[in-house]
Amino acid sequence: MKNRSIYHVDGVPKLREAIPLGLQHILAMFISNITPIIIVAGVLGISQDMKTTLIQSSMLVAGINTLIQAYTIGPVGARLPIVVGTSFAFVPIAISIGTKYGFEGVLGAALVGGVFEACVGLYIKKIRHLFPSIVTGIIVLSIGLSLLPVGIKSFAGGFGSAEFGSLQNLGVGVLVLATVVFLKQFGKGMISTGAIFIATILGLIVASILGMVDLTPVKNAGYFSIPRPLMYGVSFHLDAIFAMMLMFIVSAVETVGDMSGVTMGGAGRETTDKELSGGIIADGLGSVLATFFSVLPTTSFSQNTGMIAMTGIMSRFIVGIGAMFLVVAAFVPKIGALLTVIPQSVLGGSLIMMFAMISISGINLITKEPLKGRNAIIVAVSLGMGYGIGTVPGVLENYSETVKLIFGGSGIVVSGCIGVILNVVLPVDKEVITVKI
């Protein structure tokens, strides 16, 4: 008998259940997936027509790479419900390289970097001992904390919005958040599991009534278009390649955290060596595929990790349905345009909840052992330094751009590196045995 459970990794629920749940995942990541290439293309002066094609390619690559993570090709893929998309982490380094060497230099460096990350995945078993639950928990918690400001910015209307923080934006965000909480707490069946999708539709309707939705992009978009591979060439420069390889190490660390968040939040367990290896290999080779379609590197999306932590839904089939929507959207511009008109405040209402749930998954990993003595020191120093530097990036102002790119920003890498080092250096607490006489 076919497994229909949405909570089992191999569960294949009926389409009437899988489609809205799959769309939830796409709604959570869609804007974040296409925004990096829009930013980089704008800075590098890429034409509007080419930018539109690159957006389509970003959707296609994200869909294909998500399917590979979920269903695997040989050793490639984690066989987990991991959603893949274009990473914001690569935007600063892409702009830096692109300004110096052009977009071809960005793609050449990303090609080598992707192969490098795939090699890291092959040997992850040998260094897995460096990532016990307390270290992966610190990374997952750091990811959740670093994403909360992103959720709040969306909640208030989106970065750069003329109406940022307006009563309308905040009101719609509160409505969506309250709806998600109410449906998750009091709803049953699809009402509960589909809370984010239902809340987003409700928020979109209210936003439309308030005049916050502009359908012009949908009207202007075409009905059919084929993403083009190899639109740009590649060029290779040692300094660009080195900087990009360092960023791929950052990406691998985040992927370890995301996969741990998925298995802990959805199945209450840590990731296996095979899952970690396959997931990181897929991240690297998926980024190589991205360069083939002239778009930025891809990686696992933390907002979707938060969704799994919140709902507990582990079905790969559901994520696969979502991935197919991305693939179809890549060939039908009107679909992509329709998703882009959803106001940021509508998405922000659910993003806050999802990002906070990532933090909860990190806390669950950290507290698998008593949080005292050695463990307390590791967590305190890692989060204190990592989160502190992440919120005060000026600390690294006197250092090179490469150092700022890697260790600044979100602070995830700082937290992860300190956690790994302290876990190796600090001796394990000795249990004190008290004998009553």
Image: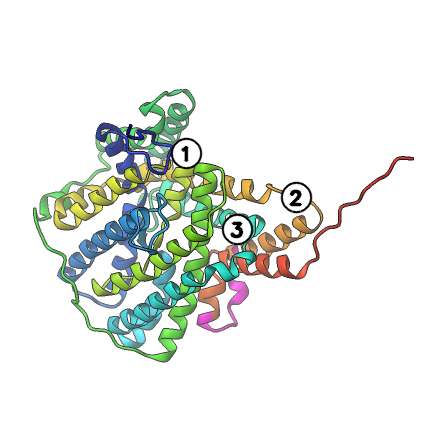
Q: Is residue 386 left or right of residue 358?
A: right
- View extreme (bottom): residue: 238
**Could you tell which of marks 2 and 3 lies nearer the N-terminus?**
3
The residue tagged 3 is 136
Cα–Cα gap, marks 1 and 3: 19 Å
Q: Amino acid at mark 3?
A: Thr
What range of the chain is rendered magenta? 391-402
Can you give x and y, in whole percent of width and height, for residue 250 in the image? 44, 61
Cα–Cα gap, marks 2 and 1: 25 Å
Question: Which residue does the image show at 51% across and 68% down from the upper left?
Answer: 397
Question: Which residue does the image show at 16% across and 60% down from the upper left?
Answer: 48
Q: How would you rate the neighbour count of disc 3 (Cα within 10 Å): few for under 14, some for 14-19, many for 20 or more?
A: many
Front-most of residues 57 and 384: 57
Looking at the rendered image, the quarter that the N terminus falls into is top left
Q: Amino acid at mark 2?
A: Leu
Q: Secondary structure at mark 1?
A: loop
Q: Amino acid at mark 1?
A: Gly
Front-most of residues 275 and 301: 275
Can you give x and y, in whole percent of width and height, for residue 154 in the image? 36, 43
Question: Which residue does the image show at 41% across and 65% down from the upper left?
Answer: 247
Can you say whether 86 is above or below 309 in the image?
below
Q: How is the image coloured?
A: rainbow
The residue tagged 2 is 371
Can you say whether 251 is above or below 72 in the image?
below
**Could you tell which of marks 2 and 1 lies nearer the N-terminus?**
1
Cα–Cα gap, marks 2 and 3: 15 Å
Q: Is residue 173 left or right of residue 423?
A: left
The residue tagged 1 is 312
Q: How would you rate the neighbour count of disc 1 (Cα within 10 Å): few for under 14, some for 14-19, many for 20 or more?
A: many
